[in-house]
């Protein structure tokens, strides 16, 4: 049943289909829980990459078509024949004692091909709750509450039941070379898996039903030979829960916005007009946005005169001094406040070191 909040979010988005959350978007969202702008845009399902392009600050990143194709091929190989390759890996690499006939169920659609999300979510719960013995479930549709609103997660995981507990299996296409992988990619994969662990626990209503050890599967040594490792994501889980709890409810943010505000990407809508609409919602920019949000270049440009644009450490150290102009003025002043004294000390040390 659509609510007033749903109707308001639909009006903000305009007549285009909503983008759905996935573990990557939730992980990125919770990396900056204080950003009202991102909270609203994501809740409305707005395509932030298209919005960034329309305001003349296109997102400079994203997976190449080659990387997407390679990733899909690796995942398809791992899941072929009822996840035969994945099961071999779980047996050999992780030493699990698994029978030959582990059941594999794809939950992408329910019987009759219905793709209704409520139905798929309920179906996933029924299937996972009634599983007996080792079993693999692909694409279970999960749900999390984000900023006071339930969101479905586009499922990109395999839930694997063994010894009465589920494990999240994340299949990623970044390579592991000489048993070393890019630490940033491993960290991102662990955080995304933690999102799925949390959502699976909520689906099953029992934190003990889903292990905090996730299984990460990647191609090894430039070839397509896979390898698997387990990663303990307890730390990521506690950060995630903390950040989700800190997020301001979307309906509170919506209540402060002009009623006529919309982000419709009409072909003839000037970039300035759309940029002004984006500017109506408070951002919370920090340099970490550059690696996690499609609107980062827009928000960086918008806030280039603020101390926040220099990072959270600088913002915290200069608490209360909002703009770079104010900092420069304090550096030349005889203000005897603590922050002004600190700024003058830094300016003197900097001048001497030059
Ligand atoms: S780039 Fe902008 S919208 Fe995205 S999280 Fe940062 S401040 Fe928020």
Image (tube, rainbow, N blue to C red):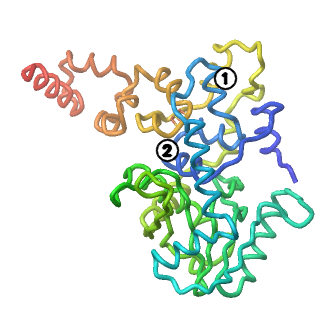
What numbered label is drawn on residue 242? none
Quadrant of the image occupied by residue 316: top left
Classify residue 110 by image quadrant: bottom right
Element type at mark 1: helix
86 lies left or right of 4: left
The answer to whether the residues at label 1 and label 2 have Cβ atoms under 8 Å apart is no
- Quadrant position of the C terminus in the picture: top left
104 or 342: nearer the viewer = 104
What residue would you read off at disc 2? 32
Camera-nearest residue between 285 and 215: 215
Where's residue 10, x and y in %?
80, 38
Residue appearing at x 38%, y 54% in the figure: 181
The picture places residue 188, in percent across and down from the top left corner, at 47, 52
Q: Which secondary structure lies at badge 2?
A: loop
Which comes before the other along the chain, label 1 or label 2? 2
Horizontal side of 29 relative to 262 (left or right) equals left
Residue denoted by label 1 = 277
Residue lying furthest left: 352
The one of 276 and 194 positioned closer to us in this rendering: 194
Residue 151, percent from left and from top: 70, 54
Instruction: Reply above or below: 62 against 108.
Output: above
Q: Is mark 2 within 8 Å of ligand 1?
A: yes
| Image quarter hosting the N terminus | bottom right
Disc 1: residue Cβ within 8 A of ligand 1's nearest atom: no
Cα–Cα gap, marks 1 and 2: 21 Å
Q: Which residue is drawn at 61% across and 57% down?
A: 75
């Amino acid at each position: 049943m659509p609510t007033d909040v749903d109707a308001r979010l639909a009006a903000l988005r305009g007549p285009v289909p909503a983008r759905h959350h996935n573990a990557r978007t939730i992980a990125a969202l919770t990396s900056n829980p204080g950003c009202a702008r991102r909270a609203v845009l994501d809740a409305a399902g707005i395509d932030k990459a298209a919005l960034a392009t329309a305001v003349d600050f296109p997102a400079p990143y994203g997976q190449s078509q080659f990387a997407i194709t390679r990733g899909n091929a690796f995942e398809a190989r791992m899941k072929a024949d009822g996840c035969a390759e994945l099961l071999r890996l779980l047996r050999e690499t992780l030493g699990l004692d698994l029978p030959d006939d582990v059941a594999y169920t794809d939950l992408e659609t329910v019987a009759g091909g219905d793709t209704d999300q409520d139905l798929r979510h309920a179906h996933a719960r029924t299937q996972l709750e009634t599983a007996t013995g080792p079993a693999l479930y692909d694409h279970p549709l999960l749900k999390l509450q984000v900023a006071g609103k339930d969101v479905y997660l586009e499922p990109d995981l395999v839930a694997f039941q063994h010894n009465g507990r589920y494990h999240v299996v994340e299949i990623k296409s970044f390579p592991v070379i000489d048993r070393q992988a890019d630490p940033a990619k491993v960290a991102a994969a662990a955080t995304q898996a933690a999102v799925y662990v949390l959502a699976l626990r909520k689906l099953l209503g029992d934190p003990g039903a889903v292990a905090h050890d996730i299984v990460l599967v990647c191609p090894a040594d430039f070839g397509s030979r896979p390898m698997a490792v387990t990663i303990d994501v307890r730390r990521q889980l506690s950060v995630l829960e903390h950040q989700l709890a800190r997020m301001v409810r979307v309906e509170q943010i919506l209540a402060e916005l002009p009623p006529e505000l919309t982000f419709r990407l009409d072909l003839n809508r000037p970039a300035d007009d759309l940029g002004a609409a984006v500017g109506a919602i408070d951002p919370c920019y920090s340099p970490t946005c550059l690696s996690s949000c499609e609107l980062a270049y827009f928000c960086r440009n918008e806030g280039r005169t603020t101390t926040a644009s220099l990072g959270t450490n600088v913002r915290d150290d200069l608490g209360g001094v909002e703009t770079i102009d104010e900092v420069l003025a304090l550096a030349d002043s005889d203000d005897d406040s603590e922050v002004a004294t600190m700024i003058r000390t830094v300016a003197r040390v900097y001048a001497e070191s030059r």
